[in-house]
Image (tube, rainbow, N blue to C red):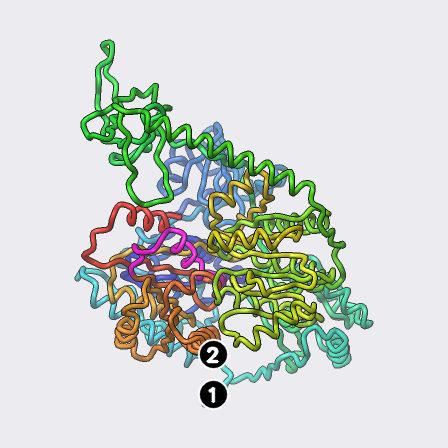
């Protein structure tokens, strides 16, 4: 059997928002499979929303697909034309899906509906060979007799004869409805929202692309129907009671788990364990005289049946990204245990990560990329403004020249294309326009150059001296990992990405050296920098050292505190926090415990830099988001660290920090691969529209999520709260900003974190720290008032649960954006 998840498109019909391409292509793969192999053993999980009439008819789908068989007549020219028509990209070498290349009479194509590319040999106008191959292993070929290549985009083929997934199913399919009443409730809510959008859209001839629940069920009843529910059904006829139950065990208690498995086997149950770490599970069970057999190939049904027939449990490796839960079916004598029962949390395996085979180095700006109005730097004359291209005749030959104007607005310089290297784009951290230099007086530019050269020399000298001092320092060499270290790391509910593995190895190697560590871990928001820090912190406390974790905001500190407290709960280490939520008496008591060595890990904001903070034996200092600290605070950090190991985490490091890392003065680890199942966040840039906001929020709440609603200023936040309550009367709203009483702010954050509120209306106070997987939509009002780094950090608050996340950047409808604001918003939308 093959099991597919047919997901709905992550937008409402009649919306102009970009659809999630990965979801769209997965749907195409399933549809192509249904049409190509209608009699094969397939199971499809889907939702009411995914059963909407968004598809072309099966006849149209087949008409716009390419079907090839061995022996078919097919010219090279027609095949190339067909692939282009289907939307495939021609490349020199096929490296990913939706690409094709040609070498003589041979084609390589990576169909959107297949997991591996194929090679087609079309000699003398005939398809001679069709071979599937693995790009990572060129010698691995599988001969095929035929191939179906589906189009990349179905949207343009949707005609008046629209279809749903149900129209693609073979007649012998069984349609099972899980909890019909809940499906109807959700379907009715979704239909109401879609109908409202349909009525409000401007084009009167737009066909209806949504059905209500009753219509979906009318189509579904053409198949054999099966209803699954926990409630009693009437009438009682045709009801089969599975009487399923949950697994009655405590996670991590493998003595109890082994005893329960033996009890099941004694009652002639078939016991199956599914884990992302099957060998570890087998080892743990063996310690309690429970021998479980690991079957590496889950498709080897004969081996599984043979082991279970012999009365032994089977362990299978789980490599998926969907959480599961175990169960017992007494009526079928079946018991299934997953990582949820074994370890208390799902251990999700990581997919295969493919790193690029080349590293792109920084390139100088090509003047061809200049836009009229851009500021430039002329090597000889200084800062000017590129105003236009102008064709100038030189020695009888006409050539376009770059025209750059300087201070007085009248003096201009024409630069020929062959001399374009003397120009470079002007860059500055300030958004203010620069002061232009004068051609008539180049002394000011010469002085600026001279001053810059001296500053660079001074910086290089200081860095060199710092590097020498660090090389001569002798720090504490941490011992190798302990068994506790391995146990704690195995409790992480996800498999590390390759970059995380490398970063952890780098950090541990630094810590085990007798030279003080000074490492920057740089990675995108939500890419797993915190987990690297958690493992370093645990290694330090296992060696008897103390750790200080410094965060720029109270919320981020609170988040780290809860993370460390949860991860270290099973071990004899005390984690505490110092922040403005703690009364003075408690704070004093905690700091005394830090000084006495009773607290192993202390988390806090800049208060940790106070003179009254003393450590018993500090071994590691972790700084999160270093760029958020001021100059004075950084000087205190420098004084604090001495020969202590230093680990810095940052998604957007300041230039000096980044330069120090790139120059080798500070070591750097880069986490560039996203976590398993993480998707890029869909960023929507729009003028404020109440209907758009309402649709975005309703869409998130309908899929069981929560919403961040961010405003740049506290002023007017209550009025926005009133408008949101009027717009969405049944929605639970919480408010959070920096001027609230500490108890109020903490209560609001806790309520939202506990899912007691649907929307958190807040300022940029959530920019760092809140990590709530249920929140996958963020709406930012007046986004033009925020900086690029702020927008980047805010957007990173969503999209941490493998669900398609959305960020809505809104600005006033009638506002003419400044050039700088346009560039910021365009940049955040593009990247």
Residue 270 x, y percent position in the rendering: 70, 74
Q: Is residue 177 visible?
A: no
The residue that label 1 is drawn on is 233
Residue at 47 percent across and 65 percent down: it is 770
Which sits earlier in the primary sequence, circle 2 or circle 1? Answer: 2
Picture quarter containing residue 357?
Answer: top right
Residue found at the far bottom of this picture? 235
What whole-number distance in Å separates the C-alpha atoms at marks 2 and 1? Answer: 10 Å
Residue 542 x, y percent position in the rendering: 72, 62
Relative vertical location of residue 308 with respect to residue 486 in this rendering, above or below? below
The residue carrying pointer 1 sits among few (fewer than 14), some (14 to 19) or many (20 or more) residues within 10 Å by Cα, namely: few
Relative vertical location of residue 217 with respect to residue 35 in this rendering, above or below? below
Relative vertical location of residue 824 with respect to residue 617 in this rendering, above or below? above
Total numbered labels placed on residues in the image: 2
Q: Tell me, yes or no, whether the highlighted magenta stretch contains residue 308.
A: no
**Residue 522 relative to residue 481: left or right:** left
The residue carrying pointer 2 sits among few (fewer than 14), some (14 to 19) or many (20 or more) residues within 10 Å by Cα, namely: few
**Residue 309 relative to residue 26: left or right:** right
Q: Nearer the viewer, residue 474 or 422?
A: 474
Span shown in magenta: 782-802
Picture quarter containing residue 265?
Answer: bottom right
Picture quarter containing residue 718?
Answer: bottom left
Residue 802 x, y percent position in the rendering: 49, 61
Secondary structure beneath dot 1 equals loop
CB contact under 8 Å: marks 2 and 1 = yes
The residue that label 2 is drawn on is 227
Q: Is residue 300 visible?
A: yes
Label placed on residue 793: none
Residue found at the far top of this picture? 395
Q: Nearer the viewer, residue 345 or 425?
A: 425
Residue at 52 percent across and 50 percent down: it is 523
């Amino acid at each position: 059997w093959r099991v597919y998840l047919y997901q709905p498109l992550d937008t409402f019909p009649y919306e102009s928002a970009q659809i999630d391409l990965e979801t769209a292509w997965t749907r195409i793969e399933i549809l192509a499979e249904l049409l190509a192999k209608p009699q094969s053993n397939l199971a499809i999980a889907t939702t009411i929303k995914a059963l909407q009439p968004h598809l072309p008819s099966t006849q149209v789908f087949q008409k716009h697909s390419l079907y090839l068989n061995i022996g078919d007549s097919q010219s090279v020219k027609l095949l190339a034309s067909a692939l282009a028509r289907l939307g495939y990209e021609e490349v020199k070498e096929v490296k990913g899906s939706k690409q094709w290349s040609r070498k003589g009479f041979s084609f390589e194509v990576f169909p959107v509906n297949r997991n591996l590319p194929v090679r087609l040999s079309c000699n003398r106008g005939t398809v001679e060979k069709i071979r599937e191959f693995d790009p990572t292993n060129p010698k691995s070929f599988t001969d095929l007799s035929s191939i179906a290549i589906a189009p990349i985009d179905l949207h343009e083929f949707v005609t008046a004869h629209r279809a749903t997934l149900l129209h693609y199913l073979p007649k012998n399919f069984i349609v099972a409805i899980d909890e019909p009443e809940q499906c109807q409730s959700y379907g009715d809510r979704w239909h109401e929202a879609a109908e409202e959008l349909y009525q409000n859209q401007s084009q009167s001839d737009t066909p209806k692309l949504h059905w209500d629940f009753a219509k979906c069920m009318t189509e579904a009843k053409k198949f054999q129907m099966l209803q699954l529910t926990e409630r009693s059904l009437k009438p009682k006829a045709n009801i089969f009671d599975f009487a399923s139950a949950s697994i009655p065990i405590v996670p991590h208690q493998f003595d109890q788990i082994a005893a329960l498995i033996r009890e099941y086997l004694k009652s002639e149950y078939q016991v199956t364990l599914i884990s992302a770490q099957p060998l570890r599970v087998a080892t743990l069970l063996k310690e309690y005289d429970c021998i479980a057999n690991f079957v590496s190939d889950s498709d080897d049904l004969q081996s599984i049946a043979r082991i279970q027939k012999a009365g032994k449990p089977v362990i299978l490796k789980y490599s998926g990204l969907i959480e599961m839960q175990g169960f017992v079916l007494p009526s079928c004598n079946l018991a299934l245990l997953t990582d949820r029962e074994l370890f208390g949390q799902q251990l999700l395996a990581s997919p295969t990560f493919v790193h690029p085979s080349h590293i792109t180095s920084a390139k100088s700006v090509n003047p061809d990329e200049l836009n009229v109005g851009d500021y430039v730097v002329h090597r000889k004359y200084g800062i000017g403004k590129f105003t236009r291209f102008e064709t100038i005749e030189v020695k009888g030959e006409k050539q376009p020249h770059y025209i750059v104007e300087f201070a007085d607005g009248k003096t201009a310089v024409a630069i020929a294309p062959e001399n374009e290297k003397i120009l470079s784009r002007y860059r500055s951290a300030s958004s203010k326009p620069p002061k232009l230099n004068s051609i008539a007086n180049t002394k000011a530019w010469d002085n600026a150059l001279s001053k810059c050269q001296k500053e660079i020399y001074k910086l290089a000298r200081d860095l060199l001296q710092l590097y020498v001092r660090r090389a001569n320092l002798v720090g504490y060499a941490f011992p190798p990992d302990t068994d506790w270290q391995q146990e704690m790391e195995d409790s992480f509910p996800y498999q590390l990405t390759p970059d995380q593995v490398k970063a952890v190895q780098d950090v541990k190697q630094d810590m085990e050296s007798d030279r003080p560590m000074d490492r920057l871990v740089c990675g995108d928001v939500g890419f797993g920098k915190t987990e690297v820090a958690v493992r370093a912190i645990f290694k330090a406390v296992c060696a008897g050292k103390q750790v200080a974790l410094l965060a720029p905001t109270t919320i981020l500190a609170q988040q780290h505190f809860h993370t460390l407290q949860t991860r270290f709960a099973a071990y004899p280490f005390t984690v505490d926090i110092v922040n403005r939520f703690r009364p003075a008496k408690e704070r004093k008591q905690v700091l005394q415990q830090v000084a006495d060595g009773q607290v192993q890990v202390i988390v806090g904001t800049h208060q940790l830099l106070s003179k009254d903070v003393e450590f018993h034996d500090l071994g590691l200092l972790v700084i999160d988001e270093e760029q958020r600290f001021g100059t004075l605070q950084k000087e205190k950090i420098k004084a604090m660290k001495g020969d202590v190991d230093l680990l810095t985490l940052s998604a957007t490091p300041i230039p000096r920090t980044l330069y120090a890392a790139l120059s080798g003065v500070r070591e750097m680890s880069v986490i560039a691969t996203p976590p398993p199942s993480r998707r890029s966040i869909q960023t929507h840039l729009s003028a404020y529209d109440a209907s758009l906001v309402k649709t975005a929020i309703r869409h998130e709440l309908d899929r069981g999520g929560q919403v961040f609603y961010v405003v740049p200023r506290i002023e007017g936040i209550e009025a926005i709260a009133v408008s949101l309550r009027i717009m969405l009367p049944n929605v639970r709203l919480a408010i959070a900003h920096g001027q609230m009483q500490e108890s109020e702010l903490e209560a609001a954050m806790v309520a939202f974190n506990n899912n007691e509120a649907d929307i958190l209306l807040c300022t940029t106070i959530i920019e760092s720290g809140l990590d709530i997987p249920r929140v996958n939509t963020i709406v930012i009002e007046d986004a033009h008032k925020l900086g690029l780094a702020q927008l980047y950090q805010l957007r990173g608050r969503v999209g941490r649960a493998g669900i398609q996340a959305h960020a809505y950047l809104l600005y006033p409808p009638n506002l003419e954006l400044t050039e700088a604001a346009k560039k910021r918003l365009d940049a955040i939308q593009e990247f």
